[in-house]
Protein backbone atom coordinates (compact mmCIF):
# COMPACT_ATOMS: atom_id res chain seq x y z
CA UNK A 1 0.00 0.00 0.00
CA UNK A 2 2.62 2.48 -1.06
CA UNK A 3 0.03 4.85 -2.45
CA UNK A 4 -2.19 4.79 0.62
CA UNK A 5 -3.34 8.12 1.99
CA UNK A 6 -2.91 6.86 5.57
CA UNK A 7 0.87 6.65 5.21
CA UNK A 8 1.30 10.09 3.61
CA UNK A 9 1.17 12.88 6.23
CA UNK A 10 0.24 15.59 3.69
CA UNK A 11 -2.66 13.51 2.41
CA UNK A 12 -3.87 12.84 5.95
CA UNK A 13 -4.17 16.57 6.56
CA UNK A 14 -6.51 16.88 3.55
CA UNK A 15 -8.81 14.12 4.73
CA UNK A 16 -11.84 15.50 6.50
CA UNK A 17 -13.19 13.97 9.63
CA UNK A 18 -16.74 12.71 9.60
CA UNK A 19 -17.62 15.01 12.49
CA UNK A 20 -16.52 18.06 10.49
CA UNK A 21 -18.62 17.01 7.52
CA UNK A 22 -21.67 16.38 9.70
CA UNK A 23 -21.43 19.85 11.25
CA UNK A 24 -20.96 21.40 7.81
CA UNK A 25 -23.99 19.64 6.35
CA UNK A 26 -26.15 20.29 9.41
CA UNK A 27 -25.50 24.01 9.04
CA UNK A 28 -26.11 23.88 5.29
CA UNK A 29 -29.35 21.92 5.48
CA UNK A 30 -31.66 24.77 6.64
CA UNK A 31 -30.29 27.08 3.95
CA UNK A 32 -30.81 24.46 1.25
CA UNK A 33 -34.33 23.66 2.43
CA UNK A 34 -35.17 27.38 2.58
CA UNK A 35 -33.79 27.89 -0.92
CA UNK A 36 -35.73 24.94 -2.37
CA UNK A 37 -38.98 25.99 -0.69
CA UNK A 38 -38.50 29.58 -1.83
CA UNK A 39 -37.92 28.37 -5.40
CA UNK A 40 -41.11 26.30 -5.28
CA UNK A 41 -43.17 29.20 -3.91
CA UNK A 42 -41.68 31.82 -6.24
CA UNK A 43 -41.92 29.69 -9.40
CA UNK A 44 -45.45 30.84 -10.37
CA UNK A 45 -44.53 34.46 -9.68
CA UNK A 46 -41.51 34.22 -11.98
CA UNK A 47 -43.42 32.19 -14.61
CA UNK A 48 -46.18 34.77 -14.97
CA UNK A 49 -44.01 37.90 -14.58
CA UNK A 50 -40.43 37.84 -15.84
CA UNK A 51 -40.84 34.54 -17.63
CA UNK A 52 -43.92 35.75 -19.49
CA UNK A 53 -42.19 39.00 -20.49
CA UNK A 54 -39.23 36.96 -21.74
CA UNK A 55 -41.53 34.72 -23.78
CA UNK A 56 -43.43 37.71 -25.23
CA UNK A 57 -40.15 39.30 -26.33
CA UNK A 58 -39.00 36.01 -27.82
CA UNK A 59 -42.31 35.62 -29.68
CA UNK A 60 -42.06 39.18 -31.03
CA UNK A 61 -38.46 38.57 -32.14
CA UNK A 62 -39.53 35.34 -33.83
CA UNK A 63 -42.30 37.07 -35.76
CA UNK A 64 -40.00 39.96 -36.72
CA UNK A 65 -37.37 37.50 -37.91
CA UNK A 66 -39.83 35.55 -40.05
CA UNK A 67 -41.32 38.77 -41.45
CA UNK A 68 -37.83 39.88 -42.43
CA UNK A 69 -37.09 36.43 -43.87
CA UNK A 70 -40.31 36.43 -45.93
CA UNK A 71 -39.58 39.99 -47.18
CA UNK A 72 -43.18 40.71 -48.08
CA UNK A 73 -42.47 44.47 -48.15
CA UNK A 74 -39.81 44.00 -50.82
CA UNK A 75 -42.25 42.03 -52.96
CA UNK A 76 -44.87 44.78 -52.56
CA UNK A 77 -42.36 47.53 -53.44
CA UNK A 78 -41.35 45.73 -56.63
CA UNK A 79 -44.89 44.78 -57.63
CA UNK A 80 -44.92 46.77 -60.89
CA UNK A 81 -41.24 46.44 -61.80
CA UNK A 82 -40.94 44.20 -64.87
CA UNK A 83 -39.17 40.89 -64.41
CA UNK A 84 -35.93 40.23 -66.31
CA UNK A 85 -35.91 43.81 -67.65
CA UNK A 86 -38.56 43.17 -70.30
CA UNK A 87 -40.93 46.12 -70.64
CA UNK A 88 -43.66 44.78 -72.93
CA UNK A 89 -47.19 44.49 -71.54
CA UNK A 90 -47.15 40.65 -71.45
CA UNK A 91 -44.03 40.57 -69.26
CA UNK A 92 -45.48 43.22 -66.94
CA UNK A 93 -48.71 41.25 -66.60
CA UNK A 94 -46.83 38.03 -65.87
CA UNK A 95 -44.56 39.77 -63.31
CA UNK A 96 -47.56 41.36 -61.54
CA UNK A 97 -49.34 37.99 -61.39
CA UNK A 98 -46.23 36.11 -60.14
CA UNK A 99 -45.46 38.72 -57.49
CA UNK A 100 -49.08 38.74 -56.36
CA UNK A 101 -48.91 34.95 -55.96
CA UNK A 102 -45.67 35.33 -53.97
CA UNK A 103 -47.17 38.03 -51.73
CA UNK A 104 -50.28 35.97 -51.01
CA UNK A 105 -48.27 32.79 -50.36
CA UNK A 106 -45.72 34.49 -48.13
CA UNK A 107 -48.48 36.32 -46.22
CA UNK A 108 -50.27 33.03 -45.69
CA UNK A 109 -47.03 31.44 -44.45
CA UNK A 110 -46.41 34.33 -42.05
CA UNK A 111 -49.99 34.03 -40.80
CA UNK A 112 -49.47 30.30 -40.11
CA UNK A 113 -46.26 31.08 -38.20
CA UNK A 114 -48.06 33.81 -36.21
CA UNK A 115 -50.81 31.34 -35.29
CA UNK A 116 -48.18 28.83 -34.13
CA UNK A 117 -46.38 31.47 -32.03
CA UNK A 118 -49.66 32.60 -30.44
CA UNK A 119 -50.49 28.95 -29.74
CA UNK A 120 -47.11 28.47 -28.08
CA UNK A 121 -47.74 31.54 -25.92
CA UNK A 122 -51.15 30.17 -24.97
CA UNK A 123 -49.56 26.86 -24.06
CA UNK A 124 -46.94 28.68 -21.98
CA UNK A 125 -49.67 30.50 -20.05
CA UNK A 126 -52.01 27.54 -19.51
CA UNK A 127 -49.58 24.65 -19.01
CA UNK A 128 -48.73 25.22 -15.30
CA UNK A 129 -52.40 25.72 -14.42
CA UNK A 130 -53.37 22.56 -16.30
CA UNK A 131 -50.59 20.53 -14.66
CA UNK A 132 -51.57 21.72 -11.17
CA UNK A 133 -55.21 20.85 -11.82
CA UNK A 134 -54.26 17.40 -13.12
CA UNK A 135 -52.00 16.76 -10.12
CA UNK A 136 -54.76 17.83 -7.72
CA UNK A 137 -57.29 15.67 -9.57
CA UNK A 138 -55.11 12.58 -9.29
CA UNK A 139 -54.15 13.20 -5.67
CA UNK A 140 -57.78 13.73 -4.64
CA UNK A 141 -58.88 10.77 -6.74
CA UNK A 142 -56.31 8.47 -5.14
CA UNK A 143 -57.82 9.18 -1.70
CA UNK A 144 -61.44 8.82 -2.73
CA UNK A 145 -61.42 5.20 -3.83
CA UNK A 146 -59.27 3.61 -1.16
CA UNK A 147 -60.89 0.36 -0.08
Image (tube, rainbow, N blue to C red):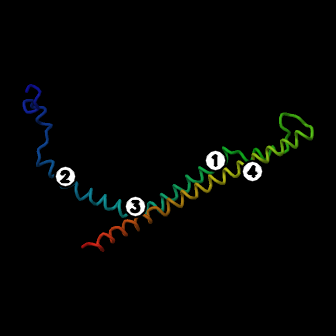
Tell me the element at label 3. Answer: helix
Q: Which residue is mark 3?
A: 43
At mark 4, the secondary structure is helix
At 58% from the left and 58% from the top, the residue drawn is 118
| Left or right of 24 on screen, residue 49 | right
Image point (79%, 44%), residue name: 99
| Sequence-first tag of 1 and 2 | 2
State the separation of the CA atoms marked 1 and 2.
52 Å
Pointer 4 residue = 104
Q: Is residue 101 left or right of residue 20?
A: right
Earlier-in-chain disc, 3 versus 2: 2
> Which residue in the structure is indicated by mark 1?
66
Label 4 – label 1 distance at C-alpha? 15 Å
Cα distance, mark 3 to mark 4?
A: 43 Å
Distance (Cα) linking label 4 and label 2: 65 Å
Query: Do the numbered discs 3 and 2 sit on residues whose CB atoms are within 8 Å?
Result: no
The nearer-to-camera label among 3 and 1 is 1
Tag 1–tag 2 contact (CB < 8 Å) = no
Assess disc 2: are there few (<14), some (14-19) or many (≥20) residues with their C-alpha within 10 Å of its C-alpha: few
Q: Earlier in the sequence, mark 4 or mark 2?
A: 2
Quadrant of res 82:
top right
Image depth: mark 4 or mark 1 in front: 4
Q: In the rendering, at what x and y percent does residue 7 appear?
A: 7, 30
Compare marks 3 and 4 and give the one earlier in the sequence.
Answer: 3
Residue depicted at 80% across the width and 46% down the height: 77
* Image quarter of residue 121: bottom right
Quick one: label 4, few (<14), some, or many (20+) residues within 10 Å? few
For label 1, the SS is helix
**Which residue is under mark 2?**
25
The quadrant of the image that shows the C terminus is bottom left
Mark 3 neighbour density, 10 Å: few (under 14) some (14–19) many (20 or more): few
Amino acid sequence: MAGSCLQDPECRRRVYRVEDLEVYYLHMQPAVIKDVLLDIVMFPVWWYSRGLILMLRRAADTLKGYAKYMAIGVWIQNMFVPMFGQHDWQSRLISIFMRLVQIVGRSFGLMIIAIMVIGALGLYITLPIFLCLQAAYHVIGSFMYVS
